[in-house]
Amino acid sequence: SETGKNQEPSAFLMMGIPGLEALHPWISIPFCALYLSALLGNCVILFIIRRTPSLHEPMYYFLCMLAITDLGLALCTLPTTLGLFWFGVRRIGFDACLAQMYFIHILSFIESSVLLAMAFDRFVAISHPLRHPAILTRGTVLKIGLAIVLRGVLSLLPIPFLLKRLTYCGRTELSHSFCFHPDIMNLACADIKVNVFYGMIILLSTVGTDFVFIVLSYILIIRTVLSLTTREECLKALNTCVSHICAVLVFFIPMIGLSMIHRFGRNVPPLVNTLVAYTYLIIPPALNPVIYTQIRLSVLLHMCWREKTERKK
C-alpha cells in the first residue's frame, strides 16, 4: 500500500517459505500436525493436573503456566500462518500486526520467566528438600506467576508506540507469516536507533537474565547432586531435571539464533531465517507436552520395573 511521509502503512504483506510458495498447501500438513499437537498436548496437561490432586504441587503449577503460555503462542501465529498456507492471505492490517507482535513477544518473555521459575523450583527441591514446601507455597507460586506476567506486559508496552512513531515509505513485505519487532522496525525509513537500543536492553534484561540464572541454578544443582552419597540418589535427583533441561534447550537455542539473525545476519539466506523463526515459535509449544509426558512416563516405568525386580529378590 502507498504511504505518505510520517504515515503508517495500512497493511503489511506476510511471507511464507521463500522459494516454496507453490508447495504451501503441502507444507501446511506438518504445520497443522504441529499446531494440533500443541493445542491438544497442552490442553491434556492442564486437564490432567487439574483433575489429579496429587499433582497440585509447585512444579506442576509452573508446568500449567508453561502449558498456558504455549497455547497462547500457538494461537497467536496459527491464524496468519495457516491463512497464508491454505488461502494465500498475505495481508495483515498495521494495528493487527502490532497487536500480534506484542502478544508473541509477551508470551515469549513469559515462557522464558516460567522456565526460570521451574529451574528455581528444581534447585529448592534438590538442594533444600525439607524447606521446599515452606518456600514455594501456593501463595508464593501465585505471586511469582503474577510478577512474570506483569514484567512481560510492562517491559514490552512501549514497543508498539515506538513502532507507530516511525515513518514508513512504501516497503511493506515482512519476512514471516507473523509479525516480529525487528522485522517491522526494519521496514521503516526513519532512524530506528531508539527501537534497536530499547529492544536490545529489554531482551538482555529479561530473557538474557533468565538464561543466566537458569545456568546458575543448574550449576548449584549439579554441586548438590555431586555431594549425594549414592549413585542412585544422584540419578533420581537428575531425573527430575531432564524434562526441564530439554524444554530450556528447545526454547532458548532457536530464540538466540533468531535474535542473532535479525540483528547481525544480513547475508543469511531468507529460507534459513524463516525456518529458525518457525522452529522458535511452533516447535516448543508442540514439543513441550511430549517432552514432559514421555520423560515422566519413562521415569515411572523405570521405577515400577525396579520395584518388581526388588520384590523378586
Image (tube, rainbow, N blue to C red):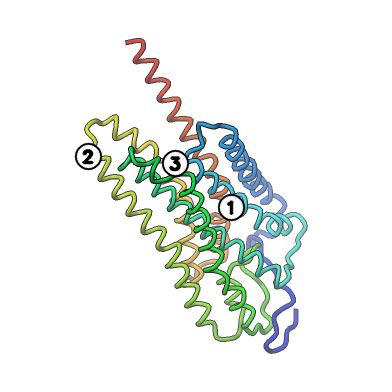
Within 10 Å of disc 1 (Cα), the crowding (few <14, some 14-19, many 20+) is some
Where does label 2 land, which residue? 227
Where does label 1 land, which residue? 282
**Label 2 amino acid?**
Ser
- Circle 2 — which element? loop
Pick whichever, 56 or 162, lies toward us.
56
The quarter of the picture where the N terminus appears is bottom right
- Which residue is outermost to the bottom? 5
Within 10 Å of disc 3 (Cα), the crowding (few <14, some 14-19, many 20+) is some
What's the CA distance linking mark 1 and mark 2? 39 Å
Work out whether mark 1 precedes mark 3 in sequence or the reverse, and give the earlier one: 3
Q: Image point 58% across, 34% down: which residue?
A: 48
Is residue 279 found left or right of 176 in the rendered image? left
Q: Position of residue 203 (x, y in %)?
A: 46, 67
Q: Image point 38% across, 18% down: which residue?
A: 307
What's the CA distance linking mark 3 and mark 2? 22 Å
Vertical position of residue 177 compared to residue 201: above or below? above
Q: Image point 59% across, 37% down: which residue?
A: 50
Work out whether mark 3 precedes mark 2 in sequence or the reverse, and give the earlier one: 2
User: Are dots 3 and 2 in contact, CB under 8 Å?
Assistant: no
Where does label 3 land, which residue? 243
- Circle 1 — which element? helix
- Circle 3 — which element? helix
